Image (cartoon, rainbow, N blue to C red):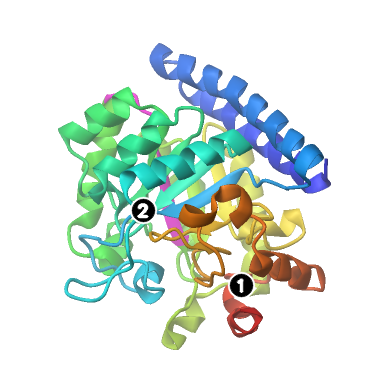
Amino acid sequence: MTDLQAYMSESIRNIMAKAYLGVLSNPHEARFVARMQKIFNASERRRKEVLKTDGLDVPPFLIASIATTCNLQCKGCYARKNGIAADPGSPQKHLLSPDQWHTIFADAASLGVSFCLLAGGEPLTQRAILEQAAAVDNVIFPVFTNATLIGPQYIEFFRKKLNIVPVVSLEGDAAATDERRGHGVYQRALLSMEMLHNEHLFFGASITVTTHNFRTVTSTDYLRHLAALGCRLVFFVEYVPFDESTQHLAFGDAEVAEMEALLDARREDVKEMIFLSFPGDEKALDGCLAAGRGFFHIGPDGAAEPCPFSPFSDSNVASLGLRDALKSPLFAKIRAAKALGWEHTGGCTLFEHRAEIEAML
């Protein structure tokens, strides 16, 4: 087993241990988390088995964009920029059927994938696909949502399908969230979080961090505010400047280092929450985890892509299957190039090297 595999497996165990502590007051959730701990141990053994027998290094994480539509028009949306999501009337990528997605999710489980992050567009617009994901109950599916579509029907769905974990997208406080996502979105997100909390459901938040907001959203006060709302998991996603006029919002070396120190401190003084940083945590893992090293991205049409910020592909999961898609020549080239010196300095490494990746095709 490689050091990376050991580190990521240990990270998954730590996540589940904290998740267990966060749901002890809810016997229904606690039983589910305890069961998932056993399943993740089995997934880890399966990944080791596939590596030993096939020489295939299966990542424990996948990211899947299951929706091409969204009911919001957030400023600087990477999904619209990369063509994952499209404006009404614009050409859209072909969307795989729910049955095709079920096959992909089941294949992922059989290879030992532990987490499949569902994105879009707005994934809650694809209830049929979420139903197929829920049926693969030995994988956890965090669903990155703007939360405006959460109502009684989705609350009941989340209550019955505990492996579907809502992750509410925020930008910080009301002013910051509404400035990027639209007037009233923050209050609607709070209402959704209140509904989830009232049902004692495990849920998280996703926050885009920039040079302007990262100190605020990593402050003890802000994170304890989220914890009081019932949030137990926070993804910090560094802003990627698709528009050159917003380059000043992207992290540099100094912000990467400060963010790392802030999260180390928060993990000590807000212990009831789980904090994950993307791609910041990659620095501790010797660089970029994309292209199958730690995860890869599946587009709405099944395209196997290095990551959501790098929409280049030479293979399709729907036609090849997950196992063969992991053998993508493009992925192999990217991992080899990373070994020659690509490292995380701020933002997305692959986005910074997009011209070189395109040339690899």
Q: Relative to 274, is 53 on the left or the right?
A: right
Q: Which mark is on residue 225?
A: none
**Which residue position holds label 1?**
350
Locate the N terminus and report the quarter of the image it occupies: top right
110 w.r.t. 293: above or below: above
Identity of the residue drawn at 37% across and 32% down:
134
Identity of the residue drawn at 22% across and 41% down:
150
How busy is the neighbourhood of tag 2: few (under 14 within 10 Å), some, or many (20 plus)? Answer: many
Q: Which mark is on residue 66?
A: 2
Q: Relative to 165, is 179 on the left or the right?
A: left
Segment tinted magenta in the rendering: 199-208
Q: Is residue 24 visible?
A: no
Q: Closer to the camera, 282 or 316? A: 316
Task: Point out the tag, 1 or 2, that comes first from the N-terminus.
Answer: 2
Q: Are marks 1 and 2 in contact (CB under 8 Å)?
A: no
In this rendering, the label closer to the viewer, 1 or 2:
2
Locate the C terminus and report the quarter of the image it occupies: bottom right
Q: Position of residue 285 (x, y in %)?
A: 74, 54
Q: Position of residue 161 (x, y in %)?
A: 35, 27
* Residue 251 falls in image quadrant: bottom right
Q: Position of residue 20 (x, y in %)?
A: 53, 22
Q: Seen from this angle, which residue lies furthest front?
A: 319
Q: Closer to the camera, 292 or 268? A: 292
Q: Amino acid at mark 1?
A: Leu
Q: Is residue 10 visible?
A: yes
Identity of the residue drawn at 42% across and 87% down:
245
26 w.r.t. 247: above or below: above
Q: Seen from this angle, which residue lies furthest bottom?
A: 245
Which element is circle 1 on?
A: helix
